[in-house]
Image (cartoon, coloured by chain):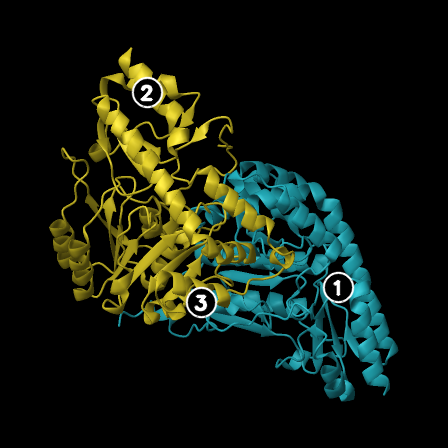
Chain colours: A yellow, B cyan
Amino acid sequence: MIHPRPQLAEVSRPDWTKDASRNPAMLWLDKNENTDPELSKVVAGVVASLPPETFFTYPEAARLYAKLAAWVGCLPHNLCLAHGSDGVIRSVFEAYVSVGDKVLHPVPTFAMYPVYSKMYGARTVGLEYEASDKGPALPPERIIAAIAKERPRVVCLPNPDSPTGTIIPPDELEAIIAAAGEVGAIILVDEAYHPFHADSVVPLITRHPHLVVARSTGKAWGMAGVRIGYAIASEEVAIALHKVRPMYETGTMAVAVFERMLDHADAMEASVTRLSAGKTLFLDRMEALGLRTLRGGGNFLHVAFGAHAEKVHAALSDLVYYRKDFAEPCLKGFSRFSATTPELFGPVITRIEESVRT
Amino acid sequence: MIHPRPQLAEVSRPDWTKDASRNPAMLWLDKNENTDPELSKVVAGVVASLPPETFFTYPEAARLYAKLAAWVGCLPHNLCLAHGSDGVIRSVFEAYVSVGDKVLHPVPTFAMYPVYSKMYGARTVGLEYEASDKGPALPPERIIAAIAKERPRVVCLPNPDSPTGTIIPPDELEAIIAAAGEVGAIILVDEAYHPFHADSVVPLITRHPHLVVARSTGKAWGMAGVRIGYAIASEEVAIALHKVRPMYETGTMAVAVFERMLDHADAMEASVTRLSAGKTLFLDRMEALGLRTLRGGGNFLHVAFGAHAEKVHAALSDLVYYRKDFAEPCLKGFSRFSATTPELFGPVITRIEESVRT
């Protein structure tokens, strides 16, 4: 047997041969995908319009870089496309993390931070959210103190975070970014849920050359299957991310779909409005039942069914996929649902109301 | 400025903001893509048939693993999907190469071998092809001697190689694979041009657990824009490759297109037959003009225009993209054209014949 790198000894990944396909007759609210049928039609229309060379040629992305820069409000030299925002995160590790470096991230957070930390031989400094009346809490001053004490190489901070949905307000976020700069750390702010949460640190890249913003097209844009995300950063960081990119940052089909979807930013925004309305409706109705909820900033929400949990889970079992519970103390007892439209949420709300009231 | 990992200091990549789009009115024979219009129709038909959830959901690839294993003739546990065969190559480096390891590969070869070697801090042992009457030559005994002497961690060997088109016969290739095993090296045989070149080392994975075969869908399958490739290896190596895979190996759209295209393997094979006929026609007509050619094993060919070069390049300049010349001594004076159909090659042949004869 030829052993892989020693850093991989502790990495384990799911069995790729096990089929986890979902039932198409049920609602898919378990993975924070965008299930808005209206936006889906727009994406399907764009795919149907692709010329044949999209499928058989290697990518050429300069036009997309120019168009995306104009939409984001930066220069093309501030961008690096990747296979999803996960590709951006991985590139940050690849560009900056050496064996023995420290990486600081909240716990719980996006599943790949601890995996990439192990993969690149980094020592993880995990900052646990505390359970509180208002849901998971991680005070910015705790993050700043940990940065000063641990002097990590990379700080990972999704805003909003997942699965907690927690948000760091703009001023406090900039203080954290500045603190990272003071110890020579790269700070990666994952804005995967933009613009469900409208605040963005993108305008700060000119002041903070050690800041990388990761963006996804899997949530608001409804393009999780297209697999294209992007980094926004100072030119010096963008050059480093391009150094570690694969042969091509992403595929021709992904480039072509995203380039055309940028002409439909209004449709993406209308979808965010619809899904946010669905989220508000669902949360209001859960609260009217006396249930505890967490609104959060992502395209998902939490509700604690409490004493009704068993009944509710049984009632929903043939209707909708969602995350039933969490092992982490800060989210214990909460179920998580991805936001969908008011129309699609309707039957889910009705079933929950029926179970809680009987 | 925050410096990236020291290993990246020598890595440089192209400026991503420079547009290198090609003119759609010309023939694209410069990147070894599959320009066969018949196969392109099949891929476009498959894309048109995709259900909407392909675009907005995260991938689930177990069905593709099962179907691909049946087509390849291995078990699903022997496979790892990736963003193109380039993704496979990179994963081999990520899984097995530590800073200071040696990586052995031919020169010239696929552009990313030296880039990934630098990126992962490996010392490169390059084996240069020699110029010969029969084209670039790299005797297997030289490779075997270098493996024994240098004891590399990874041996990279595309078969056929690119840009040389050279082939190593099956018995000699197995001797090289065995030699790599004796020094505890992983050997990566890149079969990107399968089945343009029909021989494959896939049946050897059961005897040689240190062998990884990389396959592309960008050549024979006409899916360069879809960006999906795969590794075939022993289960222990496949597990290591999965350890370093991103969050998802590839996107839902790529999984869905490839899964459906496997039902059209006959169309892929018919395309390979058409393109190979085009390649033979072109080479025969060039040889009839008295020009030197290299047939090679890939979906491309070489021709040396010699004293006619300037005239020929001028005559083709508004008709076709191709690679005019090579800096490497072993291919000096040769131009490279990707194979296309006899029909599409027709006008190119005519122009060359006219320039050479006048």
Query: Is disc 3 in contact with disc 2, using a CB cutoff of under 8 Å?
Result: no
Residue at 70% from the left image edge and 83% from the top image edge: B333
Where does label 2 land, which residue? A352
Q: Amino acid at mark 1?
A: Thr
- Circles 2 and 1: CB atoms closer than 8 Å: no
Determine the residue located farthest toward the top in the rendered image. A358
Residue type at tag 2? Ile
Q: Secondary structure at mark 1?
A: loop
Q: Nearer the viewer, residue A10 or A125?
A: A125
Secondary structure beneath label 2? helix
- Residues behind callouts 3 and 1 on a single chain: no
The one nearer the camera, B260 or A37, is A37
Disc 3 target residue? A66
Dots 3, 1 in contact, CB < 8 A: no
Q: Mark 3 and mark 2, same subunit?
A: yes
Could you say which is closer to the camera, residue A212 or residue B25?
A: B25
Please identify, in this view, whether the residue under mark 3 or under mark 1 is nearer the observer: 3
Figure quadrant of the N terminus of chain B: bottom left
Residue B80 visible here: no
Q: Which residue is identified by label 1?
A: B340
Name the spot of residue B358 as percent of width and height, x first.
85, 88
